[in-house]
Amino acid sequence: MKRASPVEVSPATTQSLTDRAYAELEEMIVTLKLAPGAAVSEAELSSHLGIGRTPIREALQRLARERLVMILPRRGIMVSEINVGRQLRLHEARREIERLIARTAARRATDEQRTRFRELARDFEKSARINDDVTFMRTDREFNLLCSNASHNEFAAGAMSLMHGLSRRFWYIHYKQTADMPLTAKLHADIARAIADKDEERAANASDRLLDVIEEFTRATVVQA
């Protein structure tokens, strides 16, 4: 049988596939399609997503940096477990960094970004009206990325990127028992509109209100356990 010639993949294409692999794997982990403690392999994920093993490997390395998976030498890859104590420590850092990002995004966002913030505010409110958790999660992911980009502070954005996935997954696991999804969505909409309006103080205060609710929710999961 004649062997097919290898297809040349440009660096830009590889990066695009890595981004796609990361986005799809992150959503699978956050929404528990890949459960905490589950063992996974590059080959299985490559086959499931229809993406080559190199982009899958690069996406898994990024997810490992974000502590959503653990790459164990000679043992394979495992989706990380949930830890409430670690989540509360994450919130300590997240509160300070999110306030900074909200404030600087309100100051530095471009006109195009401000338009998108207004659109996302409407998307958050729509997810609140219909209590749609998946739409909320996807809107939240784009909102977080937009905030980081609009802040034009690569150090704050880099620190925040390590927290988003863990935070979304924890919320998704527990929100039906102890959280108010419509309220959480509306609080996100408040931040988005404050940034769009160039109101730094309002954006920072709205960020604090959101983190107050998230921290209360996190502590409530301990009572429910």
Image (cartoon, rainbow, N blue to C red):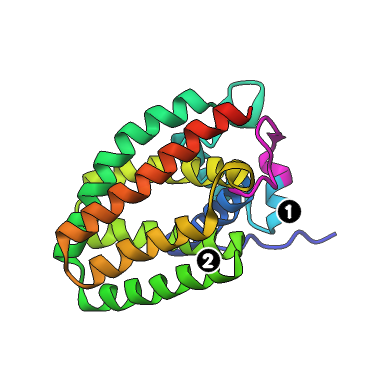
Which mark identifies residue 48? 1
Task: Left or right? Give the position of 50 relative to 93.
Answer: right
* Vertical relation: 155 (above or below) 128: above
Dot 1 crowding, Cα within 10 Å, few <14, some 14–19, many 20+: few
Front position among marks 1 and 2: 2
Inspect the magenta stretch and tell me whether residue 38 lies in it.
Answer: yes
The picture places residue 61, in percent across and down from the top left corner, at 50, 39
Range covered by the magenta-colored residues: 30-44
The picture places residue 194, in percent across and down from the top left corner, at 25, 66
Q: Which residue is pictured at 60% across the width and 50% down the height?
A: 25
Give residue 15's quadrant in the image. bottom left
**Magenta region, main secondary structure:** loop
Q: Amino acid at mark 2?
A: Ala
Q: Nearer the viewer, residue 180 or 7?
A: 180
Task: Left or right? Give the position of 105 relative to 51.
Answer: left
Q: Which residue is mark 2?
A: 128
